Amino acid sequence: MTRLARTSVWPGIAVSAGVFVACLLVALAFGPASLSLGEVWHFVTAGPVQGDLPNAIFWQIRLPRVLVACLVGAELAVAGVILQDLFLNPLTDPYVTGVSSGAALGATIGIVLHLSNLPWTTVLALIGGFLTLGIVWMAARRRGRIDIFVLLLAGVTISYLASAVVTVLMIRANQDMYAIVYWLMGSFSGRGWQDVVIALVAVPFMIAPLFFVREMDILLQGEKRALELGVEVERTKRVLLVTAGVLTAIAVSVSGIIGFVGLVVPHIVRLLVGPGHRSLLPVSLLLGASLMGIADLLSRTVIAPNEIPVGVVTTFVGAPLFVYLLRRGRKG
Amino acid sequence: MALVSLRDVDFAYDERPVLRRISFDLQAGDFVGIVGPNGSGKSTLIDLIDGLQHPTAGEVLVDDVPTRKIRRRHMAREVALVPQHFTLDFDLSVREVVEMGAYCRGKDADACADAELTLTRLGVPELAGRRFTELSGGEKQLVVLAQALMQKAKLLLLDEPASALDVSHQLRLFDLLKELNGEGLSVLCILHDLNLAIHYFDKLLVLSEGEVAAYGPPDEVLRPEIVEAVYGVRAYLHKHAGRTYLTFSPRLRGDRLGRVHLVCGGGTGAGLMRELVDAGYDVSAGALNALDTDEETGSELGLSMAVEAPFSPVGDEAHAQNLALMRSADVVMVTAVPVSHGNARNIEAVLEAAAAGTPVWAVRGVLDEDFTGVTGKLEPAGVELFADDAGMLAALGERAPEARAARKTGAGHSGPPALKT
């Protein structure tokens, strides 16, 4: 009986893993140059081959792009779960902490200063994100405790501040306006292996919350009750908030600000497997990756050879779903 | 060694003091209730014992270790708390919620089976598969108790666990707590129902304005004078079927509207006594025979009375006492008491009072069951007659605002408030 209850998590994870593999393959196969699943398999097993154009397209362009998209989707979904459940607020998404706006400011500075090309923009975005996390953190610290609501307010305030600075920079440097706007909307266009490496840094941070599933379940009853039941609440909050901040900063720095995935995926997954974190976290991770993989596929194929910014695609999918969830009422 | 001991504990939220100089010990196996008015610091006290708050001065020791130094997980294995309010808006099953209680026990394979057992023990095994958000308030309270029991702690703290329960679940809950106490669990429980507190608990701790007003066995602690001092209401002890009960009247001390003297007997005055006391009047009665229903009610309510021996006519001493009580009354009321030679002197006393200028009101019914004819003199003496008790109370109510106004302007401060016209 005990075993049954504990193993019942696995069917959900297995199904979502299957969905993820299917989405990954579809995302790898389709594009301006479509491949069959056989060809995908062939390229994967053959490894990068010099002088073979389709092989080069697959290894140098499509595979890194799809991997970045999937990693970013997973990062945003996990950060969304953590923040919604820590704030006990279903309207929370990874961007409320202000980390994304800080990253956007960093990236904008990179673009305006023409530090050229992605690495610098990405690095400055990362720095901006972490700095913001630090500032918000200091603001919310009181007598050795992190006040979750002060954190939320500080995050929103910093967001506005950073956005205001970005707007000023955009007006001052109007020849870069297009690049800044495009970055802000979010895209996986032109992302290569260096971005995959940065996005992969987040993997330990996606795994870390899995060691806190019982604590996260208990925290759904509020911080005081969690203390009563024996949870070291401040330590847990610290680990989870830093984790969510790092995940958001990394995701935003490689992809720009892509909305709705971090907000809506956790809600969809709660409807599917319930609010228990033992399944909610891994399933959100896999479905976040799947959704972003497919969204990126649509963004580069629907009006090929032009691209729709991926944020637009996720919003088109996410907005109606979100309105539907709002109409269902605040249930978690 | 005491399980919990508080030594000179002060506690303040920011600058506002909540608890002052609290010192008491809780021994293993104790079954103690905490009572006290709202805002007296009861919930804060159990938060301090659970280490959720730390004293601003003094020490709280659990197993001789200051709570400040105890890690949360270890604390949860020592002390479990059932909070007064509990919110969980997420769609978890009752089984999942109950199992969370086992968190402090680490990886415990029995936790799942224990959840069912604990719910069965509380008499609600059928809740296991339900969704927590769909439960009623009382069911939620039981589930949270089950969650706390899963901690298998030595001490259980409860904050008004019965507030959302119907009477049957209330009694079942306290019986269960008593049973768990018999198995070695120490219990410290906040409750508001003083009668439940008297019946169930071995010891009671009375908190008043952040200080311990009394700590000891219920019959020593819940004496009417202590209840009056702590809650500011009048309390009365009644013995019924071998048990002691407290009843209360909302009169605040010092809020006296005036003195009313009742002439009654045989139960014709008991209702009026209670109503007058509750309305805030200082009531006296007489002369009554000891063991008469009205005499018993009067003594439970703590009235001053002129009392005669059982089944005896009113003697000189009781008559004199009765007259003295009437003289200090603002109004004398006569109920529809049957008049015979045994209590005819009461009517004579009433006539004397009327002659002295004290307003005397009587229920017309007193004229009907008169075996002596003495009541015939009432109306000529200027006694006002009413159809029933309610009529007299209404007339009294109409006079009360005048009395209050008189007191406010200082007119009545030297003596009893003026009801006299």
Image (spheres, coloured by chain):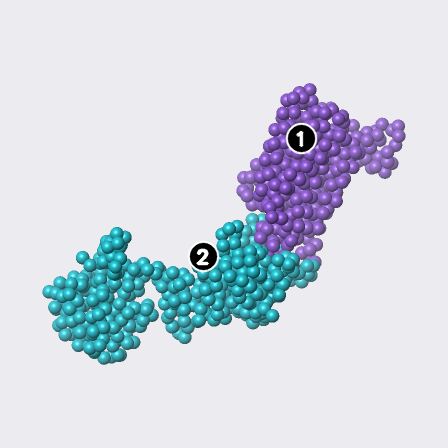
Chain colours: A purple, B cyan
The chain carrying label 2 is: B
Question: Do labels 2 and 1 touch, CB within 8 Å?
Answer: no
In the image, A166 versus B410, the foreground residue is: B410
Helix, strand or loop at mark 1: helix
Can you tell which mark lies on residue A105?
1
Q: Which residue is mark 2?
A: B38
In the image, A277 versus B239, the foreground residue is: B239
* Residue at the image position 26 percent from the left and 52 percent from the top: B409
Which amino acid does the dot numbered 1 rest on? Leu
Quick check: can you spot residue B176? Answer: no
**Residue A66: x, y in percent?**
75, 34
Tell me the crowding category of disc 1: few under 14, some 14 to 19, or many 20 or more residues within 10 angstroms, Cα based: many
* Residue at the image position 69 percent from the left and 28 percent from the top: A108
Taking the view exactly as shown, the residue that stands out farthest to the left is: B380
**Residue A132: x, y in percent?**
66, 37
Q: Is residue A22 above or below residue B13?
A: above
In the image, A225 versus A327, the foreground residue is: A225
Q: Is residue B380 above or below residue A55?
A: below
Which amino acid does the dot numbered 2 rest on? Asn
Whether marks 2 and 1 lie on the same chain: no
**Residue B393: x, y in percent?**
24, 59
